Amino acid sequence: MPTDVSTPTESPGPLKGSGARSAWALGIYFLVVFIGGALLAPWLWRAVNAVAPGSGLAGSPFHRYVNRSLYFFALVGLWPLLRSLNLRRWSEIGFAWRPNSAQQLGQGLGLGFSSLLGAALVVTLGHGRAWDFDHSAREWWSNVFNATLAALAAGTLEELLFRGALFAPLRRQWGFATATTLTALIYALTHFFKRVQFQGTIEWTSGLAVLGQMCGGFLDWHELVPAFFNLTIAGWALALARERTGTLWFSIGLHAGWIFWVKSFAFLTRGEPLADVWIWGTQKLIDGWLATLVLLAVVPLVGWLTSDSRVRQK
């Protein structure tokens, strides 16, 4: 028998506490993630080099230790963050399996995959980049494996954080438009940490130094425009899917489909010397104005595909 499914609009009452309390909790969470991750990285580097010297992991560049430490604190701090925001159940942030969750996951994955595949085809037809299929079988399988793993990991973890833990309390306190805008902006900004190579002796403050260098990406105009706009639009599309379905599954699928092509595009193509990267983008695929048009088209498609999500079968 059809039944209305609870969405963020129909959630059972507001969160205890004020919007300011939610903002403080989120601010403290990000502060702990970044400062804690930066301080943990040198100790993690020392531990790996003491336990497994000469291994491939021990030989990894130091900035990778910083990145992994940030992810570690983001995951460990997620549960305390949810409890501080009075989100006691996974279903409250949209991580609940329902009869049509598999369908939503598949629809999101199909839309994400096909939208950036379409962008890739237009880029190559416009000579923004050229296809490069000259790879060994081992390289093909390695790319498929790594891209799939990245898609599953990033699609799940980032949606759990941005459209789950962040969106849910903001949605209850300040409404859909404000919650969507804030989470989309935060989501976009986190993609502009600059990749750096640390040189010198690893000290206890080295992680903080790397973090400071990584923040230099926020000042690079050529990196920010139009990629920042594109990621903000993507954040809007993902939040719309979360709002319309009441769960994260469509968003996870959509995000995973995008990640797969972002990770594969550089492998499958090579640069064209006379290409206008301002229009076509680089090997990242989503940093040109063409991607802006594609992502703007995705937003109404998300609305159309989720138009009947409020009514489901028991």
Image: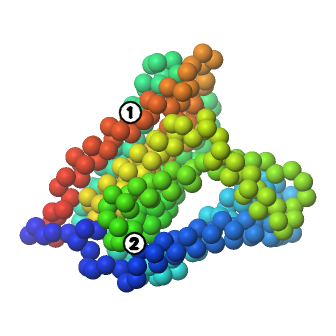
Q: Nearer the viewer, residue 119 or 208?
A: 208
Q: Nearer the viewer, residue 120 or 230?
A: 230
Q: Nearer the viewer, residue 286 or 35?
A: 35
Residue 214 in percent (x, y) is at 70, 52
Tell me the quarter of the image containing the C terminus.
Answer: bottom left
Q: Residue at x 36, y 49 (%)?
A: 237
Residue 172 in percent (x, y) is at 33, 71
The three-letter code of the residue at mark 2 reads Pro
The answer to whether one can see residue 293 in this image is: yes
Judging from the image, what secondary structure is the residue with disc 1 in?
helix
Which labelled disc corresponds to residue 47? none
Mark 2 / mark 1, whichever is N-terminal: 2
Q: Quadrant of residue 173?
A: bottom left
Answer above or below: position of 220 versus 19: above
Q: Residue furthest top?
A: 274
Q: Residue at x 40, y 79 (%)?
A: 18
**Residue beneath label 1, please?**
293
Answer left or right for 280 relative to 54. left
- Coloring scheme used: rainbow
Answer few, some or many: residues within 10 Å of disc 1's Cα (few below 14, many 20 plus, some between 14 and 19).
few
Q: Residue at x 61, y 24 (%)?
A: 271
The three-letter code of the residue at mark 1 reads Leu
**Residue beneath label 2, please?**
169
Q: Residue at x 61, y 38 (%)?
A: 221
Residue 71 in percent (x, y) is at 62, 64
